[in-house]
Image (tube, rainbow, N blue to C red):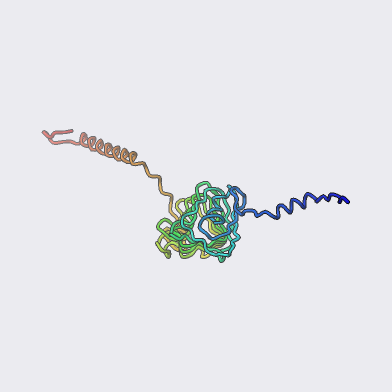
Amino acid sequence: MTRPLRLFPAALLVGATLGSLTLSPQVAGAATQTVTTCNDSGTGSLRQAVSNSAAGGTITFSLSPACSHIRLMSTIALTANLTIDGPGTSALIVDELIHKTAFSVSSGAVVAISGLNIENGAIGISNAGDLTVTDSTLSGNGSAGGGGIANTGQVTVTGSTLSGNGVDAPDEGGGAIDNQGGTVAVTDSTPKLKFSSEADSAGVSSKPASPPKLPAVARALASAVAVARLMLWIVNVARRTVWPAGTVRL
């Protein structure tokens, strides 16, 4: 006897097919990238997640096997709008292993970082864009060029801890935030950051932006013009001076 053909609903077939697939957590251009390893680079790393992120994307963390320390061998450049949503300061440390800058934010980029503990860089974050740091810790960072954050753009720090940076850090100098002509807003952070013209491990050192330097040829030309003006002034003074009879005048 011929058995009747049994038809399965399309939804069940689709579900069975998808259930057999393993979806990659890091697909280039995806809106959300997931960090799964504490390796400095390669598949699943924070560096790869940043590289794969589309503008306006978000990076999250699901570390497996569990790990708590990412040791960077070089700076991670943040050149496009991005949100890095860390697992919490007690869960993950990002350490700049060779004492460089951990993160750099390019001019024009809007970047939000939360839930990270950033340690031991010459500079924790170098910012030339629009940076927001929330519920994070920056400690043990320091150099002549900045401590926790070196800022020439716009930075907002909320609910975060900045300590042991700058003066108390390995290279001494900088301060918690070294503001170089940008804008800084700090709220609900520990310790209470104060503004100062001097480097301070718990302070915001605020300096005006450095004026742009003239090219070497322009500087040489400016010097020549200044010398010529000085000589012309000397000649004019000499011509107006009353000289004794018999003196040779210019």
Q: Quadrant of residue 160?
A: bottom right
Q: Quadrant of residue 198?
A: bottom left
Where's the C terminus, which quadrant?
A: top left
Q: Position of residue 241 (x, y in %)?
A: 19, 36
Q: Is residue 193 visible?
A: no
Q: Residue furthest front?
A: 1
Task: Please indicate whether residue 95 sits to the left or right of residue 7 in the image.
Answer: left
Tell which of 53 and 119 is nearer to you: 53
Q: Position of residue 4 (x, y in %)?
A: 86, 50
Q: Position of residue 235 (x, y in %)?
A: 22, 35
Tell which of 201 and 25 is nearer to you: 25
Q: Is residue 204 visible?
A: yes
Task: Please indicate whether residue 227 sits to the left or right of residue 179 in the image.
Answer: left
Count the marks: how many? 0
The residue under the point 36% across, 41% down is 215
Task: Please indicate whether residue 18 sits to the left or right of residue 51 in the image.
Answer: right
Q: Position of residue 216 (x, y in %)?
A: 33, 41
Q: Quadrant of residue 214?
A: top left
The vertical placement of 97 against 1, above or below, is below
Q: Residue furthest right?
A: 1
The vertical placement of 138 against 237, above or below, is below
The residue under the point 49% across, 55% down is 103
